[in-house]
Amino acid sequence: MRNDPTGRALQLLSLLQSHRLWRGAELAERLDVTERTVRRDVDRLRDLGFPVDATPGSDGGYRLAAGAHLPPLLFDDDEAVAVVVGLRAAAGAAIAGIEHTSLRALAKVEQTLPDRLRRRVSELDRSVVSLRRAHRDDSVVDPETLSVLASACQGHEEVRFGYQRRDGDYSRRLVEPHQLLSAGRLWYLIAWDLRRTDWRTFRLDRLSDVQLAGGRFTPRDIPGGDAATYLAASVASIHLEIETLVAVRAPYEHVSEALSWIQHTPVDTEADSCTIRLQANQIDSLVMAVARLALSAPVRVIEPGVVADEVDRLIGRLNQR
């Protein structure tokens, strides 16, 4: 590597892509060359179009600046696998238009993978089941909405939008947006509602006509200490919209631990069987809960049929592996 200028330049670029400030001496030690050689390699990268900033002085060093164009990226094996997995997950995200964009990017990345990494990705893909929603997915978020809200959260700018509640009631809102969060395929905004003078949680797929209102605000302390804690409390207080009824050939005490992560209510309990009602905001959660329950005891979905069909389909795919 020391006498290979091309390989050394690629390794230098890989180090600089961490976007930390590297002192010349650190780079020289990593590359096993002199600082003078590091300076020449930096100049070589600049000639190739990579914007490398240099800061003089004892506290100075080199850093890869943000460029006008995306340069070729260099990944180690774990990073390459992470990028592919992330793009495949993004292809199933509830953001309008991102599926095709992610698939195009995924195709470009996978073409560059060496065989050993393609095998790793294929093994991972075969081992993980991605469960699509069994009903029409109406929770898709407009990417422009995400962009406006993210900018407003960052710049502490007030936002106006229309909001349709779960019961169908529609109203205009003026809020101070504080944090965006995603939970599964759902996106939420944590905001201070100026007209109601209280905190509110908004589902992004129920927003419309999102606009910056022009005013700025001083961020407030979110209840519970952080947005994730507040969201968890808010979602827990919402009436769960979807439910399923299952019959289990085992006592409730035997299967209760497998259901500890989902809202459920024992409807009937016998010495060797029980009937349980499961509740969730997404059918995916119900299907996964029933499938997980089936690992502990024989289960029959009483209603609704769509959950039974999805559970059978999922278990069938798992049994084929």
Image (cartoon, rainbow, N blue to C red):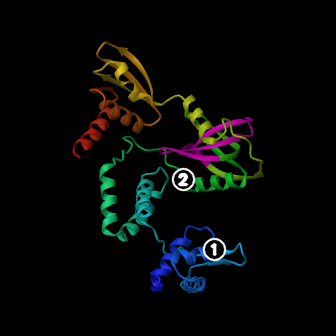
Instruction: Say the numbered circle drawn on residue 142.
Output: 2
Instruction: Say the numbered circle drawn on residue 215.
Output: none
Q: Residue at x 55, y 30 (%)?
A: 236
Q: Which quadrant is the N terminus positioned in?
A: bottom left
Q: Earlier in the sequence, mark 1 or mark 2?
A: 1
Residue 96: x percent and y percent?
49, 54
Q: Residue at x 36, y 14 (%)?
A: 268
* Amino acid at circle 1: Arg
Residue 219 in the image: above or below residue 289: below
Nearest the camera: 247 or 127?
127
In front: label 1 or label 2:
1
Q: Is residue 87 left or right of residue 59?
A: left
Quadrant in the picture for residue 305:
top left
Range of residues picked out in magenta: 179-208
Q: Residue at x 72, y 75 (%)?
A: 58
Q: Does the magenta-highlighted stretch encompass residue 147?
A: no
Nearest the camera: 159 or 132?
132
Q: Residue at x 30, y 31 (%)?
A: 294
Residue 255: x percent and y percent?
36, 24
SS majority, magenta: strand
Residue 72: x percent and y percent?
48, 75
Furthest toward the left, the residue is 320
Q: Is residue 53 left or right of residue 321?
A: right
Residue 137: x percent and y percent?
43, 44
Quadrant in the picture for residue 133:
top left
Instruction: Say the numbered circle drawn on residue 23.
Output: 1
